[in-house]
Amino acid sequence: MRCAAAADTKTGVARNANIAKLQAGYLFPEIAKRRNAHQAANPDAKVISLGIGDTTEPIPAPITDAMVAASQGLNTLEGYSGYGAEAGKLPLREALVETFYKGVMEPDEVFVSDGSKCDISRFQLMFGPGKSVAVQDPSYPAYVDTSVMMGQTGEFNDTNGQFNDIYYMSCLPENNFFPDLAKAPKTDIIFFCNPNNPTGACATREQLTELVNFALKNGSIIIYDAAYAIFIEDDVPLSIFEIPGAKDCCIETCSFSKYAGFTGVRLGWTVVPKQLKFADGFPVINDWNRVMSTCFNGASNVAQAGGMGCLTAEGFQAMQGLVGYYKENCKIIKDTFVKMGFEVHGGTNAPYVWVGFDGRPSWDVFAEILEKCDLVTTPGSGFGPAGEGFVRVSAFGHREDVEEACRRLEAVYGK
Amino acid sequence: MRCAAAADTKTGVARNANIAKLQAGYLFPEIAKRRNAHQAANPDAKVISLGIGDTTEPIPAPITDAMVAASQGLNTLEGYSGYGAEAGKLPLREALVETFYKGVMEPDEVFVSDGSKCDISRFQLMFGPGKSVAVQDPSYPAYVDTSVMMGQTGEFNDTNGQFNDIYYMSCLPENNFFPDLAKAPKTDIIFFCNPNNPTGACATREQLTELVNFALKNGSIIIYDAAYAIFIEDDVPLSIFEIPGAKDCCIETCSFSKYAGFTGVRLGWTVVPKQLKFADGFPVINDWNRVMSTCFNGASNVAQAGGMGCLTAEGFQAMQGLVGYYKENCKIIKDTFVKMGFEVHGGTNAPYVWVGFDGRPSWDVFAEILEKCDLVTTPGSGFGPAGEGFVRVSAFGHREDVEEACRRLEAVYGK
């Protein structure tokens, strides 16, 4: 019999074989580690990050004022609130509909959360294991990683840099970053991020119609990640629910993170149409509600107050000002790479510029830019094998840092 | 071929069979529904809730001041923060160790989150399906419900009110609410809430030592939920890590919800010892870190600032004042039921009074108290079949509401 002092301290609990499949760390902590190592080796370097899509600008006052008032209110009987509805405060759900889905969705189809990344893992909990999955390649790593974790995939395949049994829809310059659906297999779930992170590409109405019809034909559910929709300037849909048939095959998730600099405040939302049904006719929204009620306890009341602040006329205008600031950053970055003759994509409808480096390995380019320019970017291959040869440059920096970064890049890579 | 306009709008995605096993709704939304129905039928009734353990008192100023300052800071360059470490800000992790685990745990073993309920579902994601589970009966519903959702259990068994293939450790007056471990089978996971929700019972040092040795012998991992530890007044351990051997078999989760009225603010933490290992020797903390990095994006920065406020000398004293207020409520409730001659348990080391109604069905008693007293309680059977015959009365009300509730109870049930 073992006792507390036994030398062998292992439990008998088997490690989750699905988690064991995951390669190395999650992408962004890995980048942070390399950045820290560079800084430690070069203590005087002023490292600028255009890597992780982390917002840097202060949140406009009409929005923080709402958060201050909510925080102050918590000290009063009138302003105090405890547990709220797991799906968020009704006025916020109503304001989201009024602002983004007027006449299209109902407030009880909108679920407020602590962010899309968290909702993505809850989607996996809702769907359960054994579902087939397709993702854009490259794409935001959480789709693949949570799929692996939930057991939707096989092992990692070193030969092609993909997990087995998950379909990677290549999004490359040659197909204008929209997958060739004629070749794509039928899957249960399709993760689709539009405008895309990391390529910055944005699908047209015709392409989204093709995607929705593809899902309807196959009986698939699309998880449509619209986290960057506010950056769209072309005349294309801001929500998948503008496409006929989308309510029968789509869930949309979105977030205040990049809209209002809420990356640290944590507030997002997910829209599940009442008419979306599993194969047995059971409404998906019911199970989503059950997952939210059981695995979540509502977004922070102060964050929700901030969300309400974002959706007042004044707050919304301020929020668009913030988006405009990052868009201008993006233009500066894009112009710099274009001027230097690089292959450049994205950067118009999304805050990311996708830069090709003649097929050089992304991590090599990442390391070179970090070493020579003291700049953090994100290696394209971190988003999937089709990202190899590219780096993602994020526009979420202070203007002076972006300008300084561009000067450093020109000094090293300019002709 | 189907098209967007087809009449049959089902997708081909199979509903998660594990979620389909869950009975009705999650307990607390169900109670809210019944309360709302009662209020609608009796529009003039002043319904008082001693049901869901929801805090009602304002958060003390030393704590909200920290949140106000953080919210204001978000409007400034110096005070703005974007994505933080998924496991929380280091100063908060350090302050948690200094306050609750000094000399026992390290800051990098403490993971800040948006609450224990959310961490419980992430534990399930980490462990993965196919793990055997034991729970106290009665207990907080999230343990069973998330286990069902992750596929650790069989179907619900109408005969005994239990899910198959999950071990319910009966905690009844006759065993002083501590499970008979000599009869308990070996399981991978043991959920153990102490002080217990809903019974209010609190295990002694000897009992916890017995529990830890039981887990060590079986190679089990205990998920020790200490959400109510701050209410303990007896001379018993405040953390499972006071028990020798616990670091080899325990994870502890805790929360500011009941400590500081943060039920709406959302802040908790989980402690995973570095030396805790899976059967293959892999450190559990590494997989927990991977789950937190992949499925979570950090607790709200404003909530974390509030947490720092709680752990200053002034904030901590204010927090204990708040706890003292609810403890006084609890004494009033307990004394009322004792005086009326009911079978009464708990209410000393926890903010819950567990009242026996001579074996009458809990939902009947719940309905009667709601109907006759306009009071919301929680039916004991909602926490598991061994809770049948009891109701849980929560002390988280305003003093005048608690006193009014006790008057109403005495009017109906007093001798």
Image: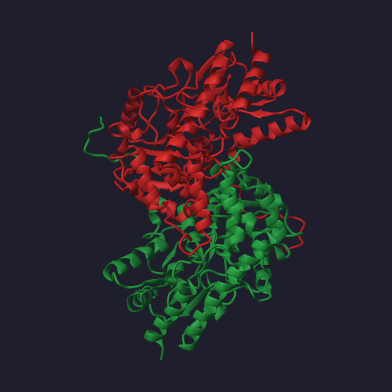
Chain colours: A red, B green
Q: In this view, does B13 lie to the left or right of A117?
A: left
What residue sits 42% from the left and 32% below the top? A229
Screen quadrant of the N terminus of chain A: bottom right
Where is residue B243 drawn, in percent x and y? 71, 66
Q: Is residue B25 left or right of residue A255?
A: left
Screen quadrant of the C terminus of chain A: top right
Where is residue A112 drawn, in percent x and y? 43, 47
What residue sits 42% from the left and 56% below the top? A85
Q: In this view, does B226 lie to the left or right of A186?
A: right
In the rendered image, the vertical position of residue A364 relative to residue B384, given as above or below: above
Between B254 and A21, the residue placed more toward the observer is: B254
Between B360 and A36, the residue placed more toward the observer is: A36
In the rendered image, the vertical position of residue B364 relative to residue A313, given as above or below: below
Between B125 and B32, the residue placed more toward the observer is: B32
In the rendered image, the vertical position of residue B393 relative to residue B126, given as above or below: below
Whether residue A288 is visible here, answered yes or no, is: yes
Where is residue A334 drawn, in percent x and y? 54, 18
Q: Which residue lies furthest to the bottom in this view?
A: B415
